[in-house]
Image: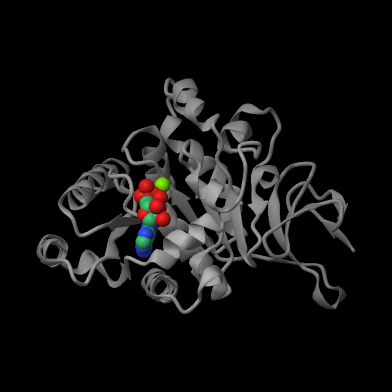
Amino acid sequence: MLINCQKCDSRLTIEEAATLPGRKICCPHCHYVFVANITGGENKILQSKEARVIAVCNRKGGVAKTTTVLNMGASLAVYGKRVLLVDFDMQANLSIVLGLTNREKSFYDLLHTPDSAISEVVKKTRYKNLWVLPSNSKMALLAKQNLNRKDFVYLLRDQLESLKKVVDYIIIDTPPSIEFYTLNALMAADFVIIPTQCEFLSVHGVAHIEEAIKVIKERKDKSLDYAILVTMADKNSTAGHVMYKKLLEQYADKVLATQIEHDVKMQESQIMNLIVAQYDKKSPSARQYLQLAEEIEKMLV
Ligand SMILES: Nc1ncnc2c1ncn2[C@@H]1O[C@H](COP(=O)(O)OP(=O)(O)O)[C@@H](O)[C@H]1O
Ligand SMILES: [Mg+2]
């Protein structure tokens, strides 16, 4: 099948063009990404809706940021959404739980290799509708080598721009800090999910992200709403109930209705490099991440 690039008008065969999620085509000449409707022998160009970009952040480590990026993303993919996960943490935990190695290209390689296109770095996962932009150990150099740039907070936003036309959701995993990496994620995002356990230091971490969101909104006149997700909830913990009440008092309707329970199946699934729904679809956390995907879908339409 022959098609024309929507931008540079080069004549391409579907095989020659690098295909992205679904039927998205990346022109090998100008790297423009577009959607071609090739059913019924037609060659119409479709304009798809722009992706929602969600950053998953908390200054505290171990609150299930990475777990939420993967399992919420996979749940949205189950509902037929095309989802790109971005591993923007030098620890590369998201890439590791997806079974990828340090040899994969990362955002660092994309930025520091002349003429490289994001479509060459994004990898299809084993799950339908789910792609990942991996991380590797070179990501640690990204901040050092780019901090002097005036536009350093927009590096991720600018690279994701072309993919916003070809997926429904972009979900960004971040490290437990509010510096170069998380700032880039917040600048690229239009929504933030802040996972927290119902324990003192995790809830404390929520306030730091909330503060950063306020500053970004004021300075940039940017739409950036957020929601708080309770993770690893323990129904039998009195301290947990107390912290949950505090969370509701402080953040009220920003706290998502869905809570993710502490579930050993989640830990087991990660050892097997699987999403929890694949490992045990009847487990509490598998059901709750599906419910979370529904809640987010309704909230972000
Ligand atoms: N619902 C859950 N039940 C039990 N363990 C969980 C759950 N969610 C995450 N974990 C575990 O908690 C640890 C930290 O999760 P992770 O997603 O890596 O946090 P972060 O990215 O915030 O550092 C991991 O060992 C993970 O397996
Ligand atoms: Mg993590």
Rendering colour mode: one colour
Dividing the picture into quarters, in which one does residue 278 lie? bottom right
Q: Using the image as rendered, state which of residue 223 and residue 184 is in the foreground.
A: 184
For the residue pair 5 and 229, the one nearer the viewer reads as 229
Residue at 39%, 41% in the rendered image: 175
Q: Is residue 271 above or below residue 280?
A: above
Locate residue 57 relative to residue 143 in the image: left or right.
Answer: left
Name the residue located 54 percent from the left edge and 69 percent from the top edge: 279
Residue 204 in the image: state x and y as whole percent. 17, 48
Can residue 18 be seen here?
A: yes
Quadrant occupied by the N terminus? bottom right
Residue at screen point 48% across, 29% down: 140
Percent coordinates x, y for residue 76 in the rendering: 50, 69
Q: Is residue 171 left or right of residue 178?
A: right
Total number of numbered discs in the rendering: 0
In the picture, the quarter occupied by the C terminus is bottom left
Q: Position of residue 114 (x, y in %)?
A: 69, 27
Instruction: Tell me the residue at 36%/67% (across/down).
Output: 263
Q: Is residue 65 visible?
A: no
Q: Is residue 201 left or right of residue 19?
A: left
